[in-house]
Image: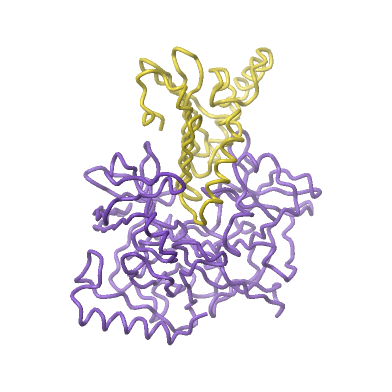
Chain colours: A yellow, B purple
Amino acid sequence: MFERRARSHESRPWLSAAVLVMLVSAFPAWAALGGDVASVQADQLHMQGSLRTTTTASYTVHEIKSATGIVVREYVSSSSGKVFGVAWQGPWPPDMRQLLGNYFEQYVQAAKAQNAARPGRRPLMIEQAGLVVEVGGHPRGFTGRSYVPEMLPAGVQAEEIR
Amino acid sequence: MKSPRIYLVSVFAIFLACAFLVGCGGGSSSTPPNTITSSGNNVAAISVDGGPVGNYADAAFTSVTVCVPGTSTCQTISGILVDTGSSGLRILASALSIALPQQNASDGNPVVECFPFVSGYTWGPVQTADVEMAGEKASSTPIQVLSSNFTVPSGCTSQGTSSNSDLDANGIVGVGLFTQDCGDYCTVVQTGGNPNLYYECSSSTVCQPVAESLAQQVPNPVSLFSTDNNGVIIELPKVSTGGEPSVGGSLVFGIGTQSNNALSGATIYTADDFGNFTTTYSGTAYPDSFIDSGSNGYYFLDQSLTGITECGGDELGFYCPAGTVNISATNQGQNGSSGTISVSIENADTLFNSNDSAYSDLGGVSGTSAPYYFDLGLPFFFGRNLYTGLQSATYANGYWAY
C-alpha cells in the first residue's frame, strides 16, 4: 500500500499539469455518464488513477484504476464522443454522483423506490427507459454498471458495458 | 423469543417426518436433516419471521444487548438482522433508549460513519458499547448508531441513497468474514473518487473524512468475544417448498471451540481479498460469487444465462418461472476445495402471495452483464449448518464451511 502511495506522489507534477489543463479548458465538473471524453479525464484526475484505453469499432473504453483497487470503466462512443456507459468494481463503490453526473438524482430516486417496494437486501436493478443501473456484491466487494439505452452506438450490445 | 424446547420439538418432528416419508422435499432426499444446537452459552436464537416490519422475506433476526461499557445500564434490542455479508453492529438510534459514549477523533471531534451497502449507505455516529449476545460479551466495542444528528456530507450522499430510513430492521449485526468493517482502506484518508467511510464532525453540519485505525473501526463483534471468537454458525431447518410462515434456528458462536460447534466434517471454502469465491454453472466459472445471509434470496446471473423467466412489474429482478426450476452449480474456494450445490427457484410472485416469511426457493437476477456472479443468500442456509470463519493467520480472508 505504501509503495502505491509513493508512486502516486511521483506523478504529482503530471497531476498539476492536468489540473491546469482542466482549469484552462473549463471542462464541466464531474459529469461522466452522458458527458464527453473530457469528463473521463476529469474522472481520472479525480480518482488519481492510472488510465488504460482500448478501442473497438464503435467505442473506446477508458479504464481508470485507483491504487485502492477500485476500477472504473467508461465507454465513449466514437461517433458522438459521449460516455454512454460506465462500469465499476472494487472494495467500495466509486463516487456515484461524479460517475453518473446528471443521472445521479434519477438513480437515487429509483433506488429509493426499489427499497420501498419490498423489504429486502438484494442487488439493485434499475431498468428505466432512460437509465439502467445495476449494483451488486457486498461490503468490501462491490460491482456495478450503468448506461443510457438511447445512447448506445448502433450495433453495440448492453452486455458489452461491464 | 422461542424456547429451546420448541427447537428440539421441531427438529424431532422433522426427524419423524423423514423417518416415515420418502425424502424431505427438495433435491436432497437422502440427506438427513441438520441438527440444530439449541443449548449453550454460545447459542443465540434467530428467527426468520418477517422482522419488525412483518413482511421482510428471507431474513434472519436476533436480539442484541448493548450496555454502557463497564456498567449494568443495558438494553436488549430485538429485530437485529444477522448479516454474514458485512462486519459490525449497526443500530437505529430510534431503537436505542440508553445513551452510549461517543467515539472521538484525536482532535476531540465525534467520529461519524458512512457505511456503503448495496441497497444504500448507513449514516451515524460511532459509539462504544459492551455488546452481549447469548452468554458472550464484546467489551467496549465500537458500533454505528444510525441517526441524522449530523448532516450527511456530500462525500457520503455521493454513495447513493440512505438506508437509515428503510432498513426494515432495528439494526444489522455483521458477523462476516472480516475482523473490521473496513480494514486497511480506512486507515488513511482517501482522496478523489475513492469514498471515505469515516468522518469527524466539528459541528452538526460540518463533517470531513478522518483516518480510522483498525482498533477504532467498527468490528465484527464476535472478534472481540473473550472466547468463541473465530466465527459463527448459522443453523436453520429445511423450509418446505412454497414457504413457511416462520422458522427458528440458532446463531452459534465459535468454530471448534466447544462441543456444540465442531466443524464435523464440513468442507472449508476460503474467500479471496474481496470476500468472494467461485461458483461454476453450466461450464462457466463466476469468481465474484459469495455466501451472504443478509441477501434475501438466491441472486444469480440473469434470464439469458439461466433460461429462468424474470418477473415483470413490481417484482422486477426476481425470477418468475412457470414451475419449479432446479439448477446445479459447483462452489470452489480459493483453497481448491469444491462441491456441488442444488438451487431450486419458484415463481416469486406466487411465493409473495402466500405472505410467508421463509422461502427456500426465492431468487432473482444478480446483474445482466459481466461480472456475473452467484449471491447465495439466506435460502442457501435453510437445512444446513453454515459456518462463517473469521479471517485469521491461517485463513487470511476467512472462509465458509458447510
| Position of B366 relative to B7 (above/below) | above
Using the rendered view, name the quadrant where residue B38 is placed. Answer: bottom left
Judge from the rendering whether residue A93 lies leftward or rightward of residue B360; answer left or right: right
Q: Residue at x 44, y 62 (%)?
A: B58
Looking at the picture, tell me which residue is in the foreground, B186 or B384.
B384
Q: Is residue A108 left or right of residue B208?
A: left
Residue B30 horizontal side relative to residue B185, left or right:
left
Q: Could you tell me how many numbered marks the image carries?
A: 0
Q: Quadrant of residue B226?
A: bottom right
Q: Position of residue A86 (x, y in %)?
A: 48, 30
* Residue B319 % position (x, y): 35, 49
Please say if B19 is above or below B287: below
Residue under the point 24% across and 75% down? B32
Relative to B317, residue B179 above or below: below
Q: Which is nearer the eye, B203 or B306?
A: B306
The C terminus of chain A lies in which quarter of the figure? top left
Residue B194, given in percent of the width and then of the height, sits at: 58, 38
Q: Residue at x 62, y 25 (%)?
A: A12
Q: Residue furthest right?
A: B203
